[in-house]
Amino acid sequence: MRQSLSVLMLASCCVASCCVACGSGGGELDPAVVNHLPDGDALGAAASGTYRLRLTTRACSGACPTLEVLGFTVSTCKVGGSETETVVLTQSGGHLRADVKVNGARVPLLSGGLFSDGEFDVGGAGVADPHLVEPLATGALDYAARAQGTLTPAGQVSGEVRLLIKGTLLGTSLSCQLTEELAGSREAGSREAGSRD
């Protein structure tokens, strides 16, 4: 269940490009910022492909409540918890888009810039469906996310993801920010033609 909360924020958005009122997330996680990150100066399409990425929670802040679901205790943020996601990256020169595979479908997620030195900066904000966290869930959840790090020519990814989610889940208010370590690599055979160089 802890995994599905992160999936909610990073994979199960309804519209990744939709600006929402996430309140005082402020600064780098403001929807006005993360929905309009600039392109970088990379060239080609060599970064395009399917990646397996592991997210490990390093810090939690704000109101990250513990919930009771069908007799089970569920933490909305657990330091040390981890999950692995399948992410499809699409590079168009200096523009980088990340889609997440959910039940076989590609869900638009984050977009932003890829630079010639391999650095990337992508983000997005939108409205998430609480039923994707828990089928019996009610309420509305807004999210904002930003991922920054490095993508090597060999397809290795490392960096940090900051996530903010606000709203009501199972009758409980939350305003939870997670900081997660990002690591992973491109799946064999998924590299598309093109070059950043």
Image: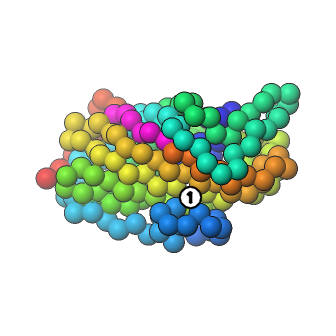
Q: Position of residue 71 (x, y in %)?
A: 86, 27
Question: Does the magenta-highlighted stretch encompass residue 25?
Answer: no
Q: Position of residue 183 (x, y in %)?
A: 39, 35
Name the residue at 13% across, 53% down. 197
Which image quarter holds the N terminus? Answer: top right
Name the residue at 46% across, 47% down. 161
Q: Amino acid at mark 1?
A: Ala
Q: Position of residue 80 (x, y in %)?
A: 54, 30
Determine whether, in the image, residue 106 is placed left or right of residue 61. left
The residue singled out by tag 1 in the image is 144
- Taking depth in this image into account, of 79 and 15 the one nearest to the observer is 79
* Image: 98 above or below 69: below
Name the residue at 44% across, 39% down. 181
* Image: 149 above or below 69: below
Residue 105 visible in the current orientation: no
Name the residue at 76% across, 38% down. 66
| SS category of the residue bearing label 1 | strand
Residue 188 visible in the current orientation: yes
- Taking depth in this image into account, of 192 and 82 the one nearest to the observer is 82
Determine whether, in the image, residue 188 is placed left or right of residue 81. left
Q: Residues within 10 Å of mark 1 (few under 14, many from 20)?
A: many
- Taking depth in this image into account, of 193 and 146 the one nearest to the observer is 146
Determine whether, in the image, residue 23 is placed left or right of residue 88. right
Seen as rendered, the residue at the extreme left is 197
Determine whether, in the image, residue 105 is placed left or right of residue 115. right
Q: Quadrant of residue 140?
A: bottom right
Colouring of the image: rainbow
Q: Quadrant of residue 97?
A: bottom left
Q: Which residues are magenta?
A: 180-186
Q: Main secondary structure of the magenta part?
A: strand
* Image: 147 above or below 104: below
